[in-house]
Amino acid sequence: MSFFVAKWRLVALCVGAAVVEASILDGFAPWATGLAPQVAAPAPFGVFHDLRWLVVYHRSLPAFFIELVALLIFRTSFDTAVVRAAWPAGMTPPRLRRAWPRTLLFTFVAAVLLTPWVVILFGLAVVSLSWLFFSAIPPVLALAVLTNGGAVSGDWWRRTIPVRAIVWIALTFLVMSLCGVVVAWDRAYLAVPVAALGGVFNAWAWNGVVGAVTSERRSRRFAPVAPAGIAFLLAVVVGGTEIGFAVTTSRAHDQREQAQQVEATSTRPAEGPPVLIASGFGTKWDGRSGPWLPGHFNEVRFSYRGLGADGTPNAYAPTDTYLGLPALEDLMSSQVDALASATHQRVSLVAASEASLVAEAYLARTPNAPVDHVVLLSPLVTPGRVYYPPAGTDSWGIVGGLGLEALSGAIGGLGPVKISPSNPLFRSIEAEAPAIRSFLSCLPPGVRQVVVEPVADAVAAPFDVSPLLPTVVVPAFHSGTLGDPGVQQVVEDVLLDRPPPANGGWSFVHRVVSRAADVWQVPSLALGLNPAWTLGVLEGASDSGACGGAG
């Protein structure tokens, strides 16, 4: 209680800011209320909060720069007031005319340092690939550890980082994540109370950080830990952007290699129900066909280059996978029809990663497709949550798109898939975002659909838009399901109309991780704000398809 009395101004600032934002968001963007406590979080989390709103919610280049200036002024003023309110008793806080310009400079530096990771999270909202989350959030946490004293002291860059401050930064990340977990249970009733509690914690954290940075026991020797750490972080990122992805998907790579070896050596003849297997974008195939599933199925590989003159799928390269959704749907339609015609049976689809979009779009446009089973492995859950305009035009998210283009061009890609805004696939996702958002809630009559989702993909999409289809959660990373023996058994059970195994505790882990990760993503752009998005069913989809509507 003594803390609340002694630091009532600090508590009022932090609680008031969080409650005001939560109340406003509850009216026009309830899905984003979990972000509200972060508006008052210790630096640089507050800047990170502001930038994620800015990168989505600007409608033109002039609007972006106006909002950026407003952001810098607000964040500088708020952090200056909070730091002065948190200043230790018995010590004279810095004068406003000195503190405000210093905080403005730090806020600008923090914004510059955080911008690449905010752009990557913008890309995550475009394509829902979980490795983008893992590429962005660890560097953000590292920057928070390295720069947390910048809003407090002008000599933060040439001194050591207090251990107490590091602990408070770690606690802030955990508590803000916990706020997201709790708010997701019932946003209507919990958003404002949780924001208030989050604000109380932030006041406590600010008090701890300011106390640690200003402590008289702290060494004053020249030790530029922060600049050295930032330089090392940037060198690691620029020099090897795919290292993290390679580590997290090493198991998936080994499984795919094993599967390819089985394909190359197997002589088992084609038999059983026909199954078309489609791998994700950025993959390649040398034209060899063979069994991937352990059961007796007539397996055919989906080709991104279509069928040859003899009716067999063509080999394809990674660049062949970067077609727009309409063209990919046509390829799948022709190959499903060919397989159904050759076997005189309905076809089962097993689509991995981004290929799940193709399968779902195909079913949305073709409600009477000759398909009886669909298994979606590591599907993209509601991509197209933000927007960027075509080149040469001005609209929502234009700077986000320009940032993606610049970042992709500078480092040659953001992982195994080059996330370039001009890529036909991603442009088609943006063009048909309202329909695409609803794909995993589609239930075409007569088709059994099951989602096999890795627990790591829980970070890829907001909790409120998790798949509504029957879902089996497995302990794997994105695309780590392809070739996993346990997942193969699940696929076989679905294709043979057997009940899939229970999720066990992984479903609970998935829900918790999804709710916690939700508050570290960029907010979704409201569908009704963007005139480029046409609400309703996909062009060519039948009303009886129940799919393709706005989400």
Image (cartoon, helix red, strand yellow):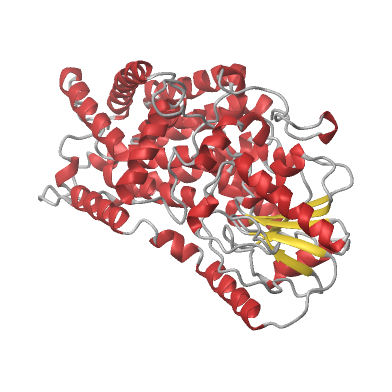
Q: Can the viewer see residue 31 in this picture?
A: yes
Q: List x then y, in percent, for residue 152.
A: 24, 33
Count numbered badges in the picture: 0
Residue 105 is situated, as x and y percent measured from the top left of the image, at 20, 29
Judge from the rendering whether residue 524 lies leftward or rightward of residue 466; answer left or right: left
Q: Is residue 81 left or right of residue 421?
A: left
Q: Which residue in the rendered view is the most extreme toward the left?
A: 222
Q: Locate residue 251 relative to residue 116 in the image: left or right.
A: right
Query: In the image, is residue 438 above or below residue 173?
Result: above
Name the residue located 71 percent from the left edge and 70 percent from the top edge. 486
Residue 471 appears anywhere in the view: no
Nearer to us in this view, 24 or 94:
24
User: In which quadrant of the rendered image does the C terminus lie?
Assistant: top right
Picture coordinates of residue 106 (x, y %)? 23, 32
Residue found 65% across the figure and 76% down from its top: 263
Q: Relative to 368, is 4 above or below? A: above
Judging depth in this view, the residue of 445 and 7 nearest the camera is 445
Quarter where residue 288 is shown: bottom right
Residue 438: image x %, image y %? 70, 35
Q: Quadrant of residue 183?
A: top right
* Left or right of residue 494, residue 515 in this image: left
